[in-house]
Image: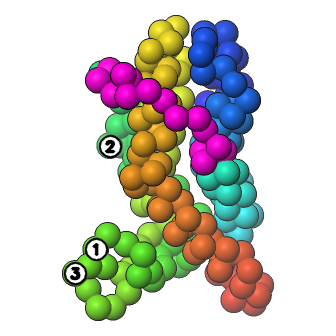
Amino acid sequence: MNYIILQSFLKNAMDINNQETINFIKSAILFCRVIEQSADDTSKDFAKKLAGSLAGLYAATVDLPSYDEEYDNIELECKVTEAMYNSVVQIVSDKLGAHDDFLTVDHVDMQYSDTPIVVHVSEDIADIYQDIVDMTHRIQSADNAIMCAALKECVDHFHEFWGQCLTRSLGALHSYISAPDDEEED
């Protein structure tokens, strides 16, 4: 993904062409770029870039305006396939190694357990990536209703699901980034 997505959005957007939405799209593109262009990054460098992009994505998402419920009934096409999803899981898991796994009590499955749940940063990131990539491809449409519906769905999913994935993984990445270098496992 690249700047062409943002240009396409600006050209085609009508009532959603505002600074908050533009900032969100920029943050979304940066988040995807960190994952897609991570081949030469060390584990810790990748974790730093990913944490920074997640923080920016969170800040930009909470600043988005609300979208009308009229956009709830618009059929939206999905871009991310299961193979793409699994590829993101593999990329992030390979980059983070042992730092991919962390314990949390902040998970939906915690209601069935009295001990912390093992969660994987890679799966949280793939869940976020799926929604973000689907949204960025949809906003390239020349149809204002589809663009609004795509943004609304992404924001709704943020509040319902991936916002929690984001903050949980950001905490795990922070622990890794802040660990002394002698504990680093690249």
Image quadrant holding the N terminus, namely top right
Residue 104 against residue 70 in the figure, above or below: below
**Residues shaded magenta:** 60-74
Q: Of helix, strand and loop, which one carries label 1?
A: helix
Q: Residues within 10 Å of mark 2 (few under 14, many from 20)?
A: few
Residue at 43% in and 18% down: 146
Residue extending furthest right?
A: 181
**Residue 44 picture location, percent across and down:** 71, 69
Q: Which residue is mark 1?
A: 109
Residue 74 against residue 63 in the figure, above or below: above
Towards the viewer: 44 or 145: 145
The answer to whether mark 3 and mark 1 are in CB contact below 8 A is yes
Residue 168 against residue 91 in the figure, above or below: below
Q: Which mark is residue 112?
A: 3
Residue 171 against residue 13 in the figure, above or below: below
Q: Is residue 73 magenta?
A: yes
Q: Residues within 10 Å of mark 3 (few under 14, many from 20)?
A: few
Towards the viewer: 114 or 184: 114
Mark 3 or 2 closer to N-term?
A: 2
**Residue 103 picture location, percent across and down:** 45, 83
The answer to whether mark 2 and mark 1 are in CB contact below 8 A is no
Question: Foreground mark, 2 or 1?
Answer: 1
**Residue 155 picture location, percent across and down:** 48, 41
Q: Which residue is mark 2?
A: 82
Q: Which mark is residue 81?
A: none
Type of amino acid at the residue the image marks with label 1: Asp
Mark 2 or 1 closer to N-term?
A: 2
Towards the viewer: 64 or 9: 64
- C-alpha span from label 2 to label 1: 23 Å
